[in-house]
Image (cartoon, helix red, strand yellow):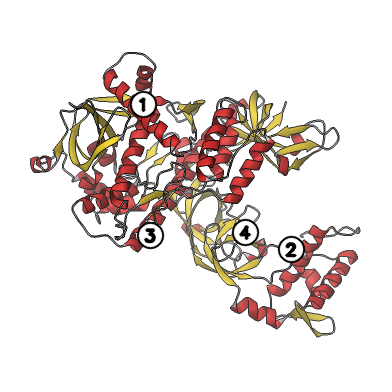
Amino acid sequence: MPRKKKFPKNKLNKLARNTFMSKVLEVFTGNPAQGFNFRQISGKLGISDPQSRELVHSMIRELRASGAIIELKRGKYKLNPEIAETMRSETRIEGVVDMKQTGKAYIISEQCEEDIFVNAGNTGHALHGDTVEVQLFPRRSGRKPEGKIKKVIKRAKEQFVGTLQASDRYAFVVPDQNNMPVDIYITKDQIRGAKNGEKVIAKISDWPAKSKNPFGEIVEILGMPGENEVEMLSILANNDWPLHFPKKAEKEAEKIPVEIPQEEIKRRRDMRKITTLTIDPADAKDFDDALSLQTLENGNYEVGVHIADVSYYVKPGSEIDKEAFERATSVYLVDRTIPMLPEKLSNGLCSLRPNEDKLCFSAIFELDENAKVIKQWFGKTIINSDRRFNYEEVQVMIEGEDGDLKEEIMILDRLAKKLREKRFKAGSINFHSQEVKFKLDEDGKPLEAFIKEQKDSNKLIEDFMLLANRKVAERVGKRPKDKDPDTFVYRIHDTPNPDKLADFAEFVTKLGYKLSIGNRKNIAKSMNELFRSIAGKGEENMIETIAIRTMAKAVYSTENIGHYGLAFPHYTHFTSPIRRYPDLMVHRLLEHYLNKGKSVPKEQYEEYCKHCSEQERKAVEAERDSIKYKQAEFMLDKVGQEFPGLISGVSKWGLFVEIEGNKCEGLVRMEDIPNDFYYLDDENYCVVGHHDGKMYRLGDAVRIVVKRIDLQKKQMDFSLV
């Protein structure tokens, strides 16, 4: 039997009293046509002791006095019909469910400035990410908006990854997702050969109105938990990623001829005799960009940014195109790439491999010694790359060693640095990104975890890609004032939320730094100065991480508002059509407009942009999940070992600590901080000892012992040394 709730005899504090009042009111708002006496209300709340029942009496008197409820007859009350009518007619809104592990939820809605709280008893059959209709409860002074989910409008997903728990007659799938509050009931005939304890993908087939659990069927068996292949496939499926290409798309790809027709070559600018190179990670297989360089008679440089011409091979409406659009991006897990295009295209026909003729869409610039663009040309080309470099090979040449095509690489590096300098002067923010990499054995087990930083060789490529993206966007977006610009796909980045920016400025001030937020240019300059001043310090990564969170997220849109972080009024993604569908759309649109085509429907392309932005978000989540899993797996045999770390976060649960050198993050729970009782001081980003006042602050260096690893939840528990 469930334990009866009992409230303390002493007077309740304001927060507890408000919470209890909310629970009493929910009995009425959840059943607006029904009458209740105090015993019935007590029973619904699960309380029986005299003190708590007296409190129910008190709450009923207050609600009656406020007009929220009316007395039907002596001792029996119901929701005021005027309030009920208001709830029915005026306060139903649409929103998206943000479900918590406890079963409670928040509804995020464009119709409401604040998120709407829904307790676990009022979520109905809604799940995380669903679009729902919510009935708002009457707003009470000082309280956040609350409501009840009345209808699921659209399911976010119907397939879930989980572990099968089977008996002789039936089974349940226990979902991997922490924010999935129910298990999926599987009848014996829907188990489809899956064994107890296996990871599976289950599809919800029905959810009867009075059933606590949805009914489902097994659609795919992944294998036993803990196996690398099973866990990586689980991460993909959990983020709604297809595990296989449709057979129609694969067959279509196989039929594409390898040979380039002579008539196609004649239609293109032939760049095969000009020195051309690619620079990519050592383990890359899809090379979608190349650079060419030649010195002109006037002393200027012609730099070609050559991008794989995916649009030549992938036609709108084809099976490959349909699947590429649905995916919208490639996904980069720790141990594999899940390509947007079938392998024949991504690693073969479209990959700019050395010493092979390849079709490209190119942006060719004449640059002077100061990297000023004198002339530009956009169009279809054919290239033949002389050399494939990885970043490390180019970096050692930049740092002084000899190597192939060193003269060309040093010119490109010099021009890239000029472009970079101009960008920062114009207000571009110099975010530093640290990437976690792993050395894996043949079974995918991590042998080493390390941080890979961006160096000049990475930045060389980045700056020429930025130049091409910016100039392509300007070519379409810059139009005479009396003419509307043609519909185009932009990569936009909004200005930061002023409140978040003010909070960040206050945060860094408390850590002893300054941030000026007076105007746009000041923010960028001050942010870059902040990054320089924290370079090499313990709090560097933590401050930069919070700075990035302060910024808006970059998305795709037909509405060009510019790119705040880069300080570009016009910006798009042109340079990676092998792995990003928006770039493929940009190629098609640019060709259309170069051929004097009319503007395409804006509303249609805006919907495409929203889909691509959402798919990008899912891909990022999958990539993060794979990193977290591999970090937890890497630490699995290190329980009991000591490591140096930095406090990367503080919360009411304890300290988050990031191990130096590999960014593995774990939680030191409050009870595991020794020698005192600690409480959170969130205004000063620290926890403080109740007796001796000892503080642990964000960015502090500490030593931890690895206490526990939960591989399935991708969580690590540490304790302080």
Residue indicated by mark 2: 142
Q: In this view, does 699 lie above or below 161?
A: above
Q: In this view, does 359 lie above or below 111?
A: above
Position of residue 420 measured from the top left corner of the image (x, y, whole percent): 40, 32
Label annotation for residue 607: 3
Distance from Cα at disc 3 to Cα at disc 4 = 28 Å
Query: Counting residues from the N terminus, which is met first, the one under dot 2 or under dot 3?
Result: 2
523, 609: nearer the viewer: 523
Helix, strand, or loop for circle 2?
Answer: loop
Q: How crowded is mark 1: few (under 14 residues within 10 Å), some or many (20 or more)?
A: few
483, 550: nearer the viewer: 483
In front: label 3 or label 4: 3
Distance from Cα at disc 1 to Cα at disc 4 = 44 Å
Query: Counting residues from the N terminus, which is met first, the one under dot 3 or under dot 4?
Result: 4
Q: In this view, does 475 lie above or below 85?
A: above
Check whether the beta carbons of the residues at disc 2 and disc 4 lie within 8 A of each other: no
Do we see residue 221 in this rendering? no
Label annotation for residue 282: 1
Position of residue 551 measured from the top left corner of the image (x, y, whole percent): 53, 45
Image quadrant holding the C terminus, namely top right
Query: Counting residues from the N terminus, which is met first, the one under dot 1 or under dot 4?
Result: 4
- Residue at x 30% of width, y 15% of height: 403
Type of amino acid at the residue the image marks with label 3:
Glu
Label annotation for residue 105: 4
Give the quarter of the image for residue 636.
Answer: top right
Check whether the beta carbons of the residues at disc 1 and disc 2 lie within 8 A of each other: no
Using residue 677 as the reference point, say whether residue 258 is left or right of it. Answer: left
Query: Counting residues from the N terminus, which is met first, the one under dot 2 or under dot 4?
Result: 4
Type of amino acid at the residue the image marks with label 4:
Ala
Type of amino acid at the residue the image marks with label 2:
Gly
In front: label 1 or label 2: 2
